[in-house]
Image (tube, rainbow, N blue to C red):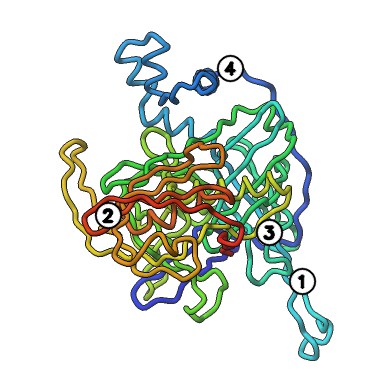
């Protein structure tokens, strides 16, 4: 099997995209067979209970709360049901393998050999992972999130793949070598998927599966996003993905750094000027080529991130021990929802993400770490202030330089509060604004000259900027 790595040239370390590619003579779509229906599981009851509670205006229960409130189990049985092993096994049902086929034509207009003049074409398949974030088994529909770099190739004839498949856990694919020496994909279990949104800026893509008999008869469940804005160092996490293209597997570790920036070379160039920068969670969870797009989960089985890369030693090109990176759920879930909303409104894919631009530049004045005695966790708190305001922008006439931002609230036109979060880190401002849509009201609370004040701005179509 030939492996394709996209690497970033750097002085000390290299961050590599965690996907792999199989070069092949061709890719044959053979369709997918369904499997017999199964009995209703406790997780189906859990999901139905939360749906019923939502219809009654009640808050969603965690799985542990559901077990405690609705079922009678002794402490030993409860501990077994809610063990990490059980949680990981449920996440398997939310995880998929992803393949994206590409063709690449190289030109040869007068060189050697003469029989290849006019160019040659080779096909190859990018292998990655994905997470089911919404599913309707009655209709056989689901949304899957993965990395953009899994379904994108800068050198392909069509940079975004037009032949994307997903495979449920237990129904994977195999790669075999044909008589001609080329690698081929046995995709008997393939479920065809369509790209409905993709962004290199955020390294996120959303896939849509429609009317799949395999999904209808499966035991798949949608993963739940963690709604926390932050993760904490030492927090136990686990990753599930298509490691080395060998099928869905699980690995665990901890959060090592709660937030750091990395750069990735999405265009496969020697220059670093066109690299993309991403905010990530650093984790000790072992990941491998093919893990790209897979979920990073906490011990409650909530998605805290999407795996996208791993650090290697620049001198040798070998992996550094367990320095892996995941895109934080606080950012990803907003990007994903923006893509889905655009698709459901227009019926067309969006290659990029629209984000509200208030016309302000913000900065971190100070950063302090302290022990939160209520949680026994060390938290980092930054003082975020307005550095400048652009003339004619939404913020012009409202915010001004040196305002300290306290919180941001986003309200829809029907007065529904979509977001309301404290601003304690610099990245909070940019990420929260991903939830704003045209017609929404953004209310920012600031401290100015020692006095707390609030300013509201209505998002216009002109203030929504597309980030590729």
In the rendered image, which quarter contains the N terminus? bottom right
Question: x, y (%) of residue 69?
Answer: 38, 14
Sequence-first tag of 3 and 4: 4
Question: x, y (%) of residue 431?
Answer: 44, 54
| Residue 269 found in image quarter | bottom right
In the rendered image, which quarter contains the C terminus? bottom right
Indicate the secondary structure of the residue bearing disc 3: strand
Which residue is labeled 2 in the image? 447
Circle 4 crowding by C-alpha within 10 Å: few under 14, some 14–19, many from 20: few
Q: In this view, does 145 lie to the left or right of 364?
A: right
Question: Number of numbered discs present?
Answer: 4
Which residue is labeled 4 in the image? 40
Give the Cα separation between the discs numbered 4 and 1: 48 Å
Which residue is labeled 1 in the image? 121
Q: Is residue 23 left or right of residue 77?
A: right
Which residue is labeled 3 in the image? 183
Give the Cα separation between the discs numbered 3 and 1: 15 Å
State which mark lies toward you, 3 or 1: 1
């Amino acid at each position: 099997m030939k492996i394709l790595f996209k690497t970033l040239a750097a002085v000390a370390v290299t961050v590599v995209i965690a996907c792999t590619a199989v070069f092949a003579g061709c890719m044959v779509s053979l369709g997918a067979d369904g499997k017999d229906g199964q009995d209703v599981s406790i997780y189906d009851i859990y999901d139905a209970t939360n749906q019923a509670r939502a219809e009654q205006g009640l808050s969603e229960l965690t799985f542990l709360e559901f077990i405690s409130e609705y079922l009678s189990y002794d402490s030993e049985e409860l501990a077994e049901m809610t063990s990490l092993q059980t949680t990981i096994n449920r996440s398997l049902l939310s995880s998929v393998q992803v393949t994206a086929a590409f063709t690449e034509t190289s030109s040869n207009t007068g060189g050697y050999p003469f029989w290849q003049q006019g160019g040659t074409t080779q096909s190859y398949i990018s292998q990655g992972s994905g997470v089911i974030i919404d599913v309707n088994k009655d209709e056989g529909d689901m949304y899957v999130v993965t990395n953009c770099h899994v379904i994108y190739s800068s050198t392909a004839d069509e940079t975004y793949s037009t032949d994307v498949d997903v495979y449920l856990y237990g129904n994977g694919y195999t790669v075999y070598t044909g008589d001609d020496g080329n690698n081929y994909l046995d995709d008997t279990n393939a479920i065809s998927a369509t790209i409905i949104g993709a962004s290199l800026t955020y390294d996120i893509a959303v896939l849509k599966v429609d009317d799949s008999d395999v999904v209808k008869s499966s035991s798949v469940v949608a993963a739940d996003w963690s709604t926390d804005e932050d993760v904490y160092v030492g927090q136990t996490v686990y990753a599930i993905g298509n490691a080395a293209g060998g099928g869905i597997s699980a690995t665990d570790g901890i959060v090592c750094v709660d937030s750091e920036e990395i750069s990735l070379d999405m265009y496969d160039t020697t220059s670093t000027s066109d690299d993309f920068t991403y905010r990530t969670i650093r984790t000790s969870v072992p990941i491998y080529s093919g893990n790209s797009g897979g979920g990073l989960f906490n011990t409650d089985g909530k998605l805290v991130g999407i795996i996208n890369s791993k650090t290697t030693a620049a001198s040798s090109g070998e992996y550094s021990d367990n320095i892996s990176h995941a895109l934080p759920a606080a950012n990803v879930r907003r990007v994903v929802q923006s893509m889905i909303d655009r698709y459901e409104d227009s019926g067309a894919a969006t290659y990029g993400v629209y984000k509200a631009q208030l016309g302000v530049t913000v900065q971190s004045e100070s950063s302090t770490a302290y022990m939160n005695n209520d949680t026994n966790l060390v938290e980092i708190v930054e003082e975020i202030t307005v550095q400048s305001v652009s003339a004619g922008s939404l913020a012009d006439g409202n915010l001004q330089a040196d305002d300290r931002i306290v919180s941001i609230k986003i309200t829809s036109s029907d007065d529904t509060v979509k977001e309301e979060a404290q601003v304690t880190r610099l990245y909070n401002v940019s990420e929260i604004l991903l939830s704003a849509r045209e017609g929404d009201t953004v209310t920012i609370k600031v401290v100015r000259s020692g006095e707390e004040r609030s300013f509201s701005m209505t998002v216009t179509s002109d203030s929504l900027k597309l980030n590729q």
